[in-house]
Image (cartoon, helix red, strand yellow):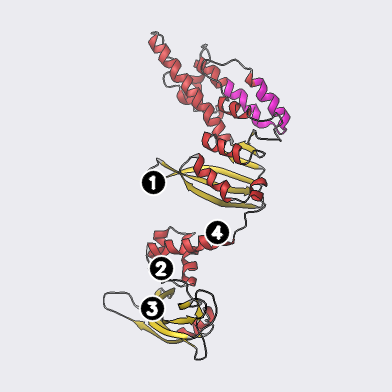
């Protein structure tokens, strides 16, 4: 089977024909397959501006367009583009079916690279198919913009807001996901972890789409919480369990450090030395030495131990399946006396108090299990 027959099967071109196909070998460079393309004798060029056919004005110099490799050999289409004398747009370069604009990669090759870039890194994709990292980047960009132009942003009920660090770890990107039961996808990326970076997403949505959002999952970043309350005041803001417990552990560690400094200042026994992880870990995750250290600490009237015990009491919160009981439990903890500087759920409490009492209504924070 000839190369032209293969191309006519996998990449048929209306109004164009494949002509001579040859292998070009230049010393010191990999061999390539070059295929010449010509328009059919009765074919009229299509204006790239309005998409209408028109008479040929002239022809440009031949251009090469890279196609999907065959047998690990690079394939190039060679074609001299025609210019159209369009009555509506003036003189325009013609529209061709295998490529668009000034791209040197065919549309089929860009989709080919973009699909492989989902499985391999961009560098590995470029090395595997003998192309450049820049070509892979442009292929992925083509796929992303194609999807953006065709995606539907209506009927979004649940979104998740998070950030990731990039470059050297000191810079952040704000990410917004759709997390509905039947649809999970990335909706938004913006530089920074600020109100502006998240507000841009809500301004991008239509008013109808914004009003349709019922649930927003986020961490306790103040900038995010402010924008969520401002843009979707009727949505339930779900604070994820990881960040709630992380704030509690941070509070426990602050109490431990403060109390250890007080003991040292007063010349008392440094009982809290090497106690950080036995106070922060869950009981089931303690090692033998850590469990023994904790057993020793509970014999003393320490603020750090009381803080840990309050955190263990709070674990009951995750067992509730009814909003009303969860509210009553949190209310009971709100009246728990502070242990030194420690109030286990201080950040949750402040956000909780911003809205109505019913956990299933209004602008208030629920907590994800």
**First in sequence: mark 3 vs mark 1:** 3
Question: Label 3 to label 4, Cα distance in Å?
Answer: 30 Å
Q: Which residue is mark 4?
A: 148
Residue at image x 45%, y 71%? 101
- Crowding around mark 1 (Cα neighbors within 10 Å: few <14, some 14 to 19, many 20+) is few
Question: Label 3 to label 1, Cα distance in Å?
Answer: 38 Å
- Crowding around mark 3 (Cα neighbors within 10 Å: few <14, some 14 to 19, many 20+) is few
> In the displayed structure, would residue 252 be above or below residue 361?
above
Q: Which residue is mark 2?
A: 129
Question: Label 3 to label 2, Cα distance in Å?
Answer: 21 Å
Q: Secondary structure at mark 4?
A: helix
User: Does the magenta run of residues contain 190?
Assistant: no
- For residue 63, the mark is 3
**Quick check: marks 2 and 1 in contact, CB under 8 Å?**
no
Q: Which residues are magenta?
A: 310-332
Q: Which residue is mark 1?
A: 167
């Amino acid at each position: 089977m000839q190369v032209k027959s293969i191309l006519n099967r996998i990449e048929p071109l209306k109004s164009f024909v494949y002509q001579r196909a040859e292998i070009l070998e230049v010393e010191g460079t990999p061999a390539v397959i070059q295929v010449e393309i010509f328009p059919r004798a009765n074919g009229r060029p299509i204006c790239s501006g309005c998409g209408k056919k028109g008479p040929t004005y002239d022809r440009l110099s031949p251009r090469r367009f890279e196609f999907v490799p065959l047998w690990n050999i690079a394939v190039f289409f060679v074609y001299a583009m025609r210019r159209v004398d369009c009555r509506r747009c003036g003189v325009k370069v013609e529209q061709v079916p295998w490529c668009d604009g000034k791209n040197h990669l065919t549309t089929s090759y860009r989709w080919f690279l973009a699909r492989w870039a989902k499985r391999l890194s961009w560098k590995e994709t470029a090395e595997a198919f003998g192309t450049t990292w820049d070509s892979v980047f442009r292929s992925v960009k083509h796929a992303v913009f194609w999807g953006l132009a065709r995606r539907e942003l209506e009927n979004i009920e649940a979104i998740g807001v998070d950030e990731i660090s990039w470059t050297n770890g000191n810079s952040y990107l704000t990410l917004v996901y759709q997390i509905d039961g039947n649809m999970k996808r990335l909706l938004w990326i913006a530089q920074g972890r600020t109100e502006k970076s998240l507000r841009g997403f809500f301004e991008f949505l239509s008013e109808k789409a914004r009003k349709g959002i019922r649930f927003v999952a986020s961490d306790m970043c103040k900038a995010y919480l402010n924008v969520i309350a401002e843009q979707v005041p009727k949505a339930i803001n779900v604070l994820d369990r990881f960040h709630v417990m992380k704030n509690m552990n941070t509070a426990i560690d602050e109490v431990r450090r403060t109390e250890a400094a007080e003991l040292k200042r007063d010349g008392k026994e440094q009982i809290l030395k090497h106690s950080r992880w036995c106070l922060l870990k869950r009981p089931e995750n303690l090692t033998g030495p850590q469990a023994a250290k904790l057993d020793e600490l509970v014999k003393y009237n320490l603020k750090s131990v009381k803080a840990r015990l309050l955190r263990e009491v709070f674990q009951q919160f995750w067992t509730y399946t009814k909003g009303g009981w969860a509210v009553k439990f949190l209310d009971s903890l709100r009246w728990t006396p502070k242990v030194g500087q420690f109030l286990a759920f201080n950040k949750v409490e402040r956000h909780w108090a911003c809205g109505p009492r019913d956990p299933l209504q209004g602008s208030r924070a629920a907590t994800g299990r």
